[in-house]
Image (spheres, helix red, strand yellow):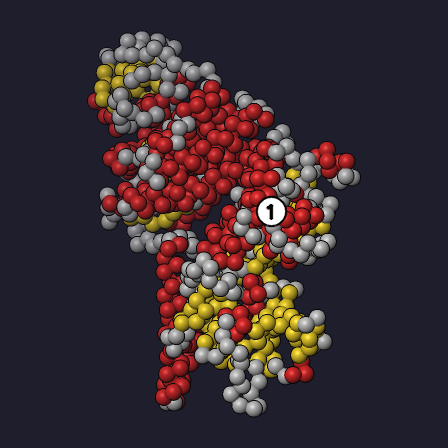
Amino acid sequence: MSHTVLICDDAIFMRTMVGDILTQAGFEIVGEAETGLQAVEKYQQLRPDLVTMDIVMPDMGGIDAVREICKKDPNAKILMCSAMGQQALVVEAIQAGAKDFVVKPFQPSRVLEAVQRVLG
Amino acid sequence: MDNLQYAELFLTESREHIAAVNKALLELERDATGPGAAPAVASIFRGVHTIKGMGATMGYAIVAELAHELETVLDRIRRGDLAINVAIMDVLFRATDVLEKAVEAAVAGRDGEVVATELVTTLHALGVSAPRRSSGGWTTPAPTGAGTLVRIRLAPDTPLRGVRAFIIVKSLRAIGEVTSTEPPLEDIEADGFETDFAVRVVTTSPAAEIERTIRKAGDVVFVRIDEPQRVSAPARAPRPSAPVTVEAMTATVPAPSGETKSVVGQARHVRIDVRRLDTLMNLIGELLIARGRLTQLAGEIGDLALEETVTQSSRLIAELRDEITASRMVPVSHVFDRFPRVVRDAARAVGKQIDFVVDGKGIELDRSMLDEIGDSIVHLLRNSIDHGIEPPDVRTAAGKSATGRLVLSAARDRSAVVIKVSDDGKGIDRERVLARAKRDGLVDANRTDLTEDELLRLLARPGFSTVDKVTDLSGRGVGVDAVYTRVRALGGAMDIRSVPGQGTTMVLRLPLTLAIMRALLVRVSAEVYAIPLAHVSETIELHPDVLRTVKGREVLLARDEVLPLMRLRDLVGLPAYQAPSEIALEHVVVIDLGDRRAGLVIDELTGQEEIVVKQYDAVRDGLPFFGGATLLGDGTPSLIVDVSSLL
């Protein structure tokens, strides 16, 4: 069975792009979230194998969402999606429990490598 | 999804973000030191950040670079490193404008066209805080301390190498204790190295295990593990929590669910290309025409079952039309939200203080209509700012508050939406307009005043305003003709109310939708014309006792009201009415437009029909009384009477 993914990003554009990359690689996108709060709720609901998490989102940022998700499920596999110039935030996200990161602009190969590392 | 669709998504979302950024910038400007500042900066940051990510992904270099520099500045503001002042606000506003242009240009395939070098430099200067960088290189000295020395080289193109290094350190912590790093950990996190760094780790794992752990973290091209140093007495033992972490890190935990996952609670909204909605609207229009024809044929055939089916289909088609019309409606805020920024800029440019109020943002209007009318509203707002509202000193001298008030409102009135732009400025200088009109021979030389209708008609005359500008008459009137033409083309109407010294209100009355309307069909000789039902208040028979003559002109007496009367056959140049029989009477359609009413004489009422307005490219010197054309149920073409041009 293919791995299930929850995509969290406030931009449809980004959700679509990540979704396309992962779908083409055989993953199953089971949900999308536009805010950190939604991400936490949907994680609980869907229990996906993998979460891709944007850092900057309304309501609750990605880092707090990582913290919340990992509090409830320390084994959550979360891949941060960041932009250049966010090192400090990505470090914080990793400390909070995220497993790896990819940097925008996304290259499909990089995204898939990172996903493989996260799913170990 | 192909690239074009990505580009469209990018454009749509970027526009939304730019609008949000502009809104937040205005909030920030208003409340730079107050409690509203932090959320405003956060919201601006979010918008810019998202555009940066999307732009970079699309390969729009200028967009990404500009957004990146802007974001850096915002980050400093957010952290309190940079205080807001007028100069910085200006840079932020300017940067947002250029970013918007860059976005549009990039999507149009002209990414390189927006030159932002200077702005980027300005932003960059604002954004730099002392960079932390060390020389680095493979010559990284070995960190002191206990444990195995591990040297690690990352791939040169590793993104966020500081974070990658941090992940490596974190994964090493899972198998032992990292006692020191070179450069120090905080420098590593801040990218303070080139490709190489070194750590000392106290662990019981063999070298192969250490290397495997490191390589698994990714982007590692080279690992060198030195002989473990003897763990000397003061060295700390591995943390007791380590085994737990190891398990957490390496154990392969199966996904906690085996059941099929479905997409639960997906968004209840989908995005639809406007062109698709346009196509649907056209199709339903054609369907309505076909329905008219079908109804007519069924009536002729007179089969009961057929008529029943036709009636049922008719109802379904009507429902379908209502749904499609509704799906095209968007709140006016879609367009109104960018106006505060426009007003701010225009007011600043002419040194005026303006309090801008927007009312009725939730009122909905057809998407195409809204897009069409946006520029006209901007025109009216600019008019008010440039020519209506006085400079602060003039206002104070006139006993008004120094800050002018500009109100944009939208409201629903039956099947129309009324948009008003009103200011509390000096009003239109009627005397000058009158003088100009007399000089051009447009009004009688003996006139001493103009009615509001005349004022509008004069201001709306193409050329009248241009002459105005050239001679610097009163100024007021610039562009009113353009707005008037646009509003009429959309099937709407326009009014001006102006009180000297107190202000001017421009009223735009727009139909809810462009494409479909109910119309009263009337016959004059052999011609059938359509009159929009929204503008018909009643129809009456033209008995001789409802006719009066006032000052040599025919008027209509309807419900104790005296209304001007006009004959459609005279307007279109048909020969005089010949009654087909002795008892036959002409009919009058009472047309109204808000507070203006008149009687329109026609031969006969032939029915009501749902008509589909077809673009009507009127011959320039053709009759001005028609606002479009349509095909009737039986396939004959018919002209649509433009009520606003008659009143």
Residue drawn at 45 percent across, 25 percent down: B119
Foreground pick, B229 / B343: B343
Location of residue B272 in the rendering, given as x and y in whole percent from the top left corner: 38, 54
Name the residue: 31% across, 16% down.
Answer: B194
Residue B152 vs residue B146, the one in the foreground: B152
Q: Is residue B100 above or below residue B601?
A: above
Instruction: Tell me the crowding category of disc 1: few under 14, some 14 to 19, or many 20 or more residues within 10 angstroms, Cα based.
Output: many
Tell me the kind of residue under disc 1.
Gly
Residue that label 1 marks: B477
Position of residue B538 in the picture relative to residue B47 (left or right): right
Which residue is nearer to you in this view: B430 or B298? B430
Q: Position of residue B612 (x, y in %)?
A: 43, 67
Q: Position of residue B581 (x, y in %)?
A: 53, 90
Of residues B351 and A25, the one nearer the viewer is B351
Would residue B253 be seen by someone viewing this image from the given angle? yes
Residue B335 in the image: x percent, y percent? 51, 48
Whether residue B445 is situated above or below residue A14 in the rendered picture: below
Quick one: which residue is furthest to the bottom in this view? B582
What chain letter is assigned to the residue under label 1? Answer: B
Q: Is residue B539 above or below residue B20?
A: below
Residue at left offset 37%, top offset 16% = B192
Is B15 above or below relative to B242?
below
Q: Residue at x 52, y 54 (%)?
A: B485
